[in-house]
Amino acid sequence: QVQLVESGGGLVQAGGSLRLSCVASGRTFSGYAMGWFRQAPGKEREFVAAITRSGGITYHADSVKGRFTISRDLAKNTVYLQMNTLKSDDTAVYYCAARGGSWYYTGIDEYNYWGQGTQVTVSS
């Protein structure tokens, strides 16, 4: 079992930045690939970014490429999502997710463990 706790959400003006954190506890963090997803009101949950268990490879959705960056700190059991140049369309609840495996994964159904989410609101 892996427990995930997100933090760092909040209210920010368009063009601003936020950094989300997700702390993992339980099993060995380095054994898990990690991902970030988001869900806006009235919409389905969507993929944002993913990272391999070593942190050596990352992948970002086209909608956030060049603005968001996923990273991880194995010593701190933490995965981050640095979000720059935020837009009103980025308003959503952001979730981190974990699964075993050696690659990165973009599908919601591919992840076994989920955090409770953190709200990000971007005002225009």
Image (cartoon, rainbow, N blue to C red):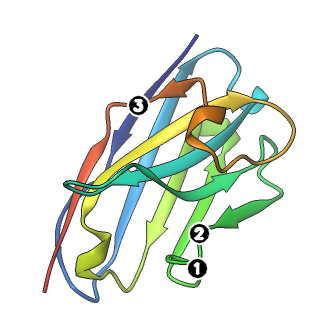
Residue 12 got which mark? none
Relative to residue 43, is residue 110 depicted above or below?
above
Q: Nearer the viewer, mark 3 or mark 2?
A: 2
Name the secondary structure under disc 3: loop
* Of residues 88 and 32, the one drawn nearer to the viewer in this rendering: 88
Residue 49, horizontal then vertical, whole percent: 59, 59
- Image quadrant in which you'd find residue 69: bottom right
* C-alpha separation, residue under disc 1 versus residue under disc 3: 23 Å
Q: Which residue is mark 1?
A: 65
Q: Please indicate whether residue 13 sits to the left or right of residue 84 in the image.
A: left
Residue 100, horizontal then vertical, whole percent: 75, 27
Q: Please indicate whether residue 16 sits to the left or right of residue 2 in the image.
A: left
The residue shown at (59%, 33%) is: 109
Q: Which residue is mark 3?
A: 115
CB under 8 Å between discs 1 and 3: no
Q: Which residue is mark 2?
A: 61
Relative to residue 84, is residue 52 depicted above or below?
above
CB under 8 Å between discs 2 and 1: yes
Residue 74, horizontal then vertical, whole percent: 69, 40
Disc 3 residue type (three-letter) = Gly
Task: Looking at the image, tell me whether mark 3 or mark 2 is earlier in sequence order.
Answer: 2
Q: Quadrant of the N terminus?
A: top right
Disc 2 residue type (three-letter) = Ala
Q: Please indicate whether residue 31 sits to the left or right of residue 7 in the image.
A: right
- Image quadrant in which you'd find residue 78: top right
Relative to residue 46, is residue 102 depicted above or below?
above
The residue shown at (33%, 77%) is: 17
Name the secondary structure under disc 1: loop
Name the secondary structure under disc 2: loop
Disc 1 residue type (three-letter) = Lys
The residue shown at (59%, 23%) is: 112
